[in-house]
Structures are given as C-alpha cells and as structure tokens.
Amino acid sequence: MNIHPKKFALFGNVYQAKKSAHVLRLLSILEKYQAEVYVQKEFFQFLTKEQKMDIRVAGTFEEDNFEADMVLSMGGDGTFLKAASHVGNKNIPILGINTGRLGFLADVSPEELEETFEDIYKNNYKIEDRSVLQVTSEGQPLKSTPFGLNEIAVLKRDSSSMITIHTSINGAYLTTYQADGLVIATPTGSTAYSLSIGGPVIVPHSNTIAITPVAPHSLNIRPIVINDDWEITLDVESRSHNFLVAIDGRSETCREGTRLVIRKADYNIKVVKRPNHIFFHTLRDKMMWGADSRG
C-alpha cells in the first residue's frame, strides 16, 4: 500500500553544479507539504559550501545512517544506483529525479516536480520491485558492498590479454568464455552496460538474468538469459593473475583463483513510478527505439 511520505532522505549528484538550482524548487515544494527533508552530508556540503546555497533542512546523514518514508535521488541513473546501494534492504521506495539525460531509473524531469508530488500526496503512484544481484567470493572477501541493482561484471584488469571465465549454472557447466569480461545483468541493468556490449533489452519484472560476454574471442558465443533464481559460478583465469569485479560501476581487484558465486539477493529495491511513466515510452524516447533514420 502506498504511503503519504512525511520524511524524505535526499541524495544528489555533487558534479552537477548548474543543476543544483532544481534542489531549491524541490525543497520549496516539499515545504508546502510540511515534509521533513534530510540530506546526505556530502551533497549538503556541496550545496551550501561550494554552491553557496542557503537551504534549510531537518538534518543531514552519512552513508546508510538514515530512516525515511521515501528516498529522493537527484541526478541521473548513476546517482540513483548510489542511493540504492545505501538504501539496501531498508525497503524504502526511491524516486529518481533526473537532472541529466533521460534515464530509466531517474525518469521524473524537474519540470514534472509539482505534479509528481501532487500525485504522491494523492496516493497516485506505483511502486515497482526491482531484483538485486549478490556476489560472494570464495578465497578473497570483497571490500565493497556485494549487491548490484544493475549488474555484476568480471573484467580484465589491464589492456593486455583477455581473461578465461569458466562458468557454471546451478552446478552444471555452461561454457568457458575467453573474453575481455562477462556482464551479468538484472532486467533493470539490461539497458545499461549490458546493452552496450550487445546484451538483450529485458523488460522489468521478467524474473531473469542476462549473461553477456565483453568482446568474446569466439564469434559463436551469444548472450544467454536464465531464470533469476538460478546460481551462477565463475572461476577466472588471467595471465596477469588478477581481474576486476565491478558492481554497478564500483570496481575492485580480485586475485586469480577467487571463485565468484552470483545469485539473486534476498531483498528488492523499490522504485517509485508515476502512473503515466511506461517502460516502452522511455525505451523509445531514450534509445530512439524503432525510429527510422533513413530520413
């Protein structure tokens, strides 16, 4: 059931100086609804110290140390992913306000702010559950959070030779990829990195995972889509004896011989959507999907 949010946690992009004026409008709209707004500390310091903005909020917070009825992400899809990593399993819905190019996650434009919050306070909004991937490593623990809303990628660390990735699904051998890497994406992540290397577009809520190689050595290896309750095991060999694991763009080095196990996490990320925001519309608008460029 949708709630009337009273308390918001705001995340923002600290690299978008020109766009920070939208924050003032957002705060003045929320003031009308007598909402309490808490701002991530780094973003608050960027607004007040670097942008010299005079903003009054209920308080600031660091990292995952917050509670709220709704999280607001102001930026692009990258800012949304960062906010989602801090929300984790708190079960707090996230609204993405897009101040960059049109996004799939952050799909409310600054021009729509007034009507969006009018809708939210009239309970006229949807909450979509999006699946999350979790990676565990046997042999070497990962330093960063092991959860990815978009994708978990295994990549070669330097520009030299490709890596060898022995891949099994539910314990059954699938294939050995010789490639620059392998991207394992949720439906949410299917329109991000995975798409740029030839992966399929997957509609949200299809309960699947796409496995797509990056620059494979063999031309007859294609992306494969599997059930999202299946478990993927990767054993990686590399001439340089290490490789990268990138989780929603956050990457770290792993030693050769580290076995990775990827499965669906036991929680979802809740995404706030306006009733008129439909995946296929965004697909056409963002990707010029199906547009004929022949003039």
Image (spheres, helix red, strand yellow):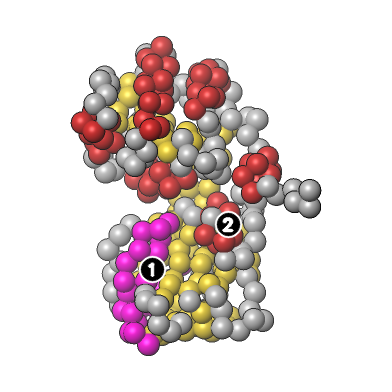
Please, which residue is most extreme toward the front here? 295
Q: On residue 245, which mark appears?
A: 1
Residue 263 shown left or right of residue 253 in the figure: right
| Residue type, label 1 | Val
Q: CA distance from mark 2 to mark 1?
A: 18 Å
Q: Is residue 140 visible?
A: yes
Q: Is residue 292 above or below residue 182?
A: above
Q: Is residue 286 above or below residue 110?
A: below
| Residue at 58% over, 30% down | 274
Q: Find residue 37 and report its horizontal and vertical position in percent.
A: 33, 24
| Residue type, label 2 | Ser
Residue 186 shown left or right of residue 295 in the figure: left
Q: Secondary structure at mark 1?
A: strand
| Residue at 51% over, 67% down | 183
Residue under circle 2? 190
Q: On residue 82, which mark appears?
A: none
Q: Find residue 122 and report its horizontal and vertical position in percent.
A: 55, 17
Q: Is residue 88 visible?
A: no
Find out whether residue 261 is within the magenta segment. Answer: yes
Whether label 2 touches label 1, CB < 8 Å: no
| Towards the viewer: 84 or 288 | 288
